[in-house]
Image (cartoon, rainbow, N blue to C red):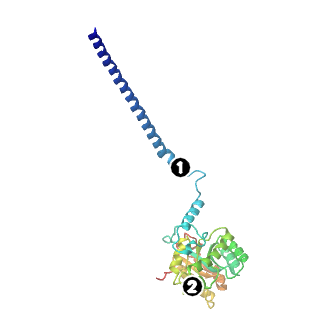
Amino acid sequence: MGRKNRVYRRGSRSRYSRYGRDNRFVRNIIIISVSAAFVLAAAGVLVWYFVFFLPQQTLPDPVSSDAPSAAESSQTAESVVSQQAPVHAYEALYPQMYVPKVEKIGAADGEKSVYLTFNNAPSAKTDRLLEVLEQQDVKATFFIYCNENTDEYLKAAIKKIYDKGHTVGVSSNTYDYRTIYASVENYLADFAKVFDLIEEATGEKPAVFRFAGGSVNGYNRSIIRELAAEMERRGFTYHDWSLDSGDSNPQATGQQIYDTTVNGILSSGKSVVLMDSHSDATLEQLPAIIQKAKENGYEFKALDASTKPFTMALPE
């Protein structure tokens, strides 16, 4: 009886042990399955975040109303330039005095073009110059020199030039070369006066300018490289000239101005002509100069920031 009982008990322990192993096996399977499910779920969340969610947060929709416009983009670019840590103190001056940089386009092969540019504008002859240009269907460029005129007069004249479709560029507020070329800071102060007047009159920032006296003169040699670099950093394009009409010489006759200008135009594919808006002889000869150039297949254009400029070689 005791032996049977012992046998029974031994068999009972064996059966229960098997059941325990089976339970542990099932439990392990469940744990592994749950862990795998968590891992797959976490992987799915990561894939969704990096593939779908994150790009939508960092990349603007190009057709969305929230995407920046071209104007906003250019303003942003200007802000980035102006907010960079300045190398020179003057770089922080006049933070509004920036324009977008644009690619410069040179003359095409075989191109025959003329850019009439008038210094010392406006003048008492500006209205008559505008009439001649309109009659000849020609656009030109006027570089503004304030010359102690009132702001009201200047803005009215600038607006008239602009409304006729001509380019308005900056020359200078004063021709006191010793003062404006004494330093980069002095030049910027002089430039800002004309820049602001043009923007107020036209609603647009002028992008082109001409150094008073040309980019190389007897007053600016010590600063011109630094000055030119600063103006270009701000996005401005300066234009010298390839052909001087000679009308700044009070002794020059109308015939001399005509011959110099026409011969210079016809001997070149592209000409940027320097003229003085105060010259009676230029006003008198202008229709004949334009007609002769047109007869020879030349087209008249106004300068802009994209026109590859004629510039003088800067001194070392």
> What secondary structure is marked by label 1?
helix
| Image side of residue 313 versus residue 196, left or right | left
Specify the amino acid type for callout 2.
Answer: Thr
Front residue (pair 259, 36): 36
Front residue (pair 223, 292): 223
Q: Which residue is mark 1?
A: 57
Dot 2 or dot 1, earlier in sequence: 1
Q: Which residue is mark 2?
A: 260
Placement of 198 over or under 217, stated as above or below: above
Badges 2 and 1: C-beta atoms under 8 Å apart? no
Estimate the x, y position of residue 71 in percent, counting from the top left: 60, 61
User: Which residue extends farthest top?
Assistant: 1
Within 10 Å of the Cα at label 1, are there few (<14), some (14-19), or many (20+) other Cα atoms?
A: few
Question: Can you tell which of label 2 and label 1 is closer to the viewer?
Answer: 1
Residue found 52% across the figure and 81% down from its top: 223
Q: Quadrant of residue 160?
A: bottom right
Estimate the x, y position of residue 6 in percent, counting from the top left: 28, 13
> What secondary structure is marked by label 2?
helix
| Image side of residue 43 versus residue 138, left or right | left
Residue found 30% across the figure and 13% down from its top: 8
The answer to whether residue 280 shows anywhere in this view is yes
Front residue (pair 73, 249): 73
Within 10 Å of the Cα at label 2, are there few (<14), some (14-19), or many (20+) other Cα atoms?
A: some
Specify the amino acid type for callout 1.
Answer: Gln
